[in-house]
Amino acid sequence: MFSIYITAFIVGGLICVIGQLLFDVAKLTPAHTLCILVVAGSILDGFGLYEPFIDFAGAGATIPITSFGNSLTHGALAEAEKHGIIGVLTGMFEVTSSGITSAILFGFIASFLFRSKGKA
Amino acid sequence: MVTRGVIQFKTAPSIASTGVTAGPLERKSPFSESFDKIYDDERCGQDTNEHGHAKLMEDASMIALSKVNAIPEDADFLLTGDLVNQMTPSNFCATTLGIPYIGLFSACATSVSSLLTAAILTDAGISELAIAGSSSQHNAIERQFRYPIEYGVQKGDSAQWTVTAAGAAAVTPHSEGVPSIERGTIGKAIDMGLTDPLNMGAAMAPAAADTLFRHLEGHGASVEDYDVIMTGDLGKTGYEILKRLADLQGIRNTDNFRDAGMEFYGKDTKFFAGASGAGCSAAVYFSEIYNKMLSRQYKRVLLIATGALLSPMSYQQGDTIPCTAHAIELTMK
Amino acid sequence: MDKEQYSTIEQEISPKPSIIKNVFKAFLTGGIICLIGQFIALFYITFFDFTERTASNPTVATMVFISMLLTGFGLYKKIGQFGGAGAAVPITGFGNAVVSSAIEHRTEGYVLGVGGNIFKLAGSVILWGVFSAFAVALIKTILVKLGVVSW
């Protein structure tokens, strides 16, 4: 029962360590780093590895941005299984809609509520 | 005799007064006592960052004018610049002041390039009163060159913090009792192949070194002739590199080297390697340095403002960062 | 002095990121954010009709909401400065990218400013996510049709 919390912490932390190494060692920008991780999540799901990974690490696998690539691919594959090639297009956002939708909505709401402040 | 970019002013135009304005965070600066006006609001009471930016420059200019009992209608030229797209803050400030205006872009070196241009106009006998200056506003510049203010990007120790500040100087024909502009050197644009926009000091140091060496050689001067040689916004990293470059050139004694950016926020590590921005050197030169010249603590100073000539687009297209540095020599008799 | 000579001097003097320290802080920050995510998932499983698999949707939305508050109150940039990739990689970092762009551009209006810039930073992640998902799904679908692999 408690082990999932420890695994989530360690696995989530380790994915971030990969990101930090891409920042500091490979000297990539945050944008390049995040894109690489998203593509990695997508490819892992192509091999059917990301879902078992979620079972193992819980939020440690669903909270990092890699899971965004996974859920896009997963949605596309699930529809492709039912409807063939056309499902690749129609299924893509089926699983991942909550992240995008909430980011758009909360971003828009925030723009009414907040202003950026140049404090150190 | 004419030497490339090295200027000797025949009439030694004077800086009759200065005006410095700054944002609320700049109260932390050890120089804040000598700033003329500090706002409680980072937008200077305006609706947008960019309007606040224009207000900074406008108020600094008005303060400099008021100290010589002048109004904008008395001024012959306004020579200012900033870092926002197409320099709208300077342009809008010029609209309000109604002084004949040329916008100047030398990035953070605009404090000196504007002062040099004002001195050239005065030396040529076509200006009795010119306002020179530059400004920057943290929020407006950060979003222009880097990321949104609230984006959680990790900055390294060589990063610098754009100041919210403006400095203006009233340049008049030579008069006694105030600092005068004797010599100057116009910088080249120098690119040593650096690409990191979060390490500007290292990109700008070679430009500062080149202008320093050309100034010393062109005027037959040595570093010991100056009470202080102050660069603009090299920050800790750039300052150390400049000292190394001077050492390689055979200049061993760099005790009188100072950097406005490195000193701007004191030793506070929240600001990484120090301050930057077009308002950084202007604010320090026109308060700290100018006041110390008025009180004759400094009799001869060399001010070398440095600027990185990049845009977000040039960076994204993979270009390296060209930099410049302009030098001006002030004396107090 | 040529560029190579200068590069040697510059690299000698410019401060290096302390990689071990940064990696540790990224691990800690990222780990804590995922741990919070795990607790939120537990909340949805316990008090609402969600399974372990479906709980990730409301969890992600909740995390983005928290990220909005932290960004709006100027705290996320501090977490980002401390945690580096530990703050950028979790979904909260995606939320921070969207929210910070949105509030930065409100002065240009809600259509041209917020509307036009909300995906200024996050857009690249969406593009590459969608494109890679398309490519992976297409390849796999073709391979399945050819009988090379199975679903």
Image (tube, rainbow, N blue to C red):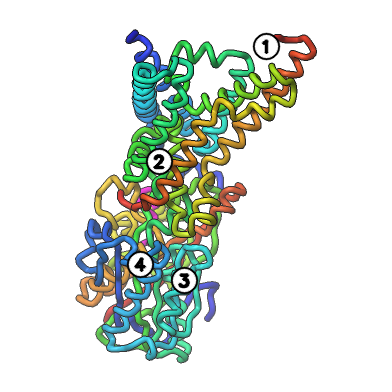
* Mark 4 or 1: the one toward you: 1
Q: Are marks 4 and 1 in contact (CB under 8 Å)?
A: no
Q: Where is residue A37 in the image (x, y as percent from the top left)?
A: 54, 27
Q: Which of marks 4 and 3 is nearer the N terminus?
A: 4
Q: Residue B153, located in which quarter of the rendered image?
A: top left
**Of discs 1 and 2, which sits in the foreground?**
1
Pointer 1: what residue? C151
Left-right relation of A45 to B27: right
Is C79 included in the stretch rendered in magenta?
Answer: no
User: Relative to residue B227, is residue C3 depicted above or below?
Assistant: above
Where disc 2 sits, the SS reads loop
Q: For mark 2, what is the residue?
A: B152
- What is the magenta range? B231-238
The residue identified by callout 4 is B46
Residue at the spot 28% in from the left edge and 67% down from the top edge: B227
Q: Which residue type does callout 2 highlight?
A: Gly
Q: What residue type is labelled 1?
A: Trp
- Labels 2 and 4 touching (C-beta < 8 A): no
Q: Which of marks 3 and 2 is nearer the N terminus?
A: 2
Q: What element carries label 1?
A: loop
Neighbour tally class for label 1: few under 14, some 14-19, many 20 plus, Cα within 10 Å: few
> Which mark lies nearer to you, 4 or 3?
4
Chain letter for mark 1, please.
C
Quarter of the image where the C terminus of chain C is located: top right
Q: Is residue B65 above or below residue B50?
A: below
Q: Chain ID for label 4?
A: B
Q: In which quarter of the image is residue B22?
A: bottom left
> In this figure, which residue is indicated by the disc labeled 3?
B185
Left or right of B4 on screen, residue C30? left
Give the mark nearest the N terminus, 2 or 4: 4
Q: Label 4 neighbourhood size at 10 Å, few (<14), some (14-19), many (20+)?
A: some
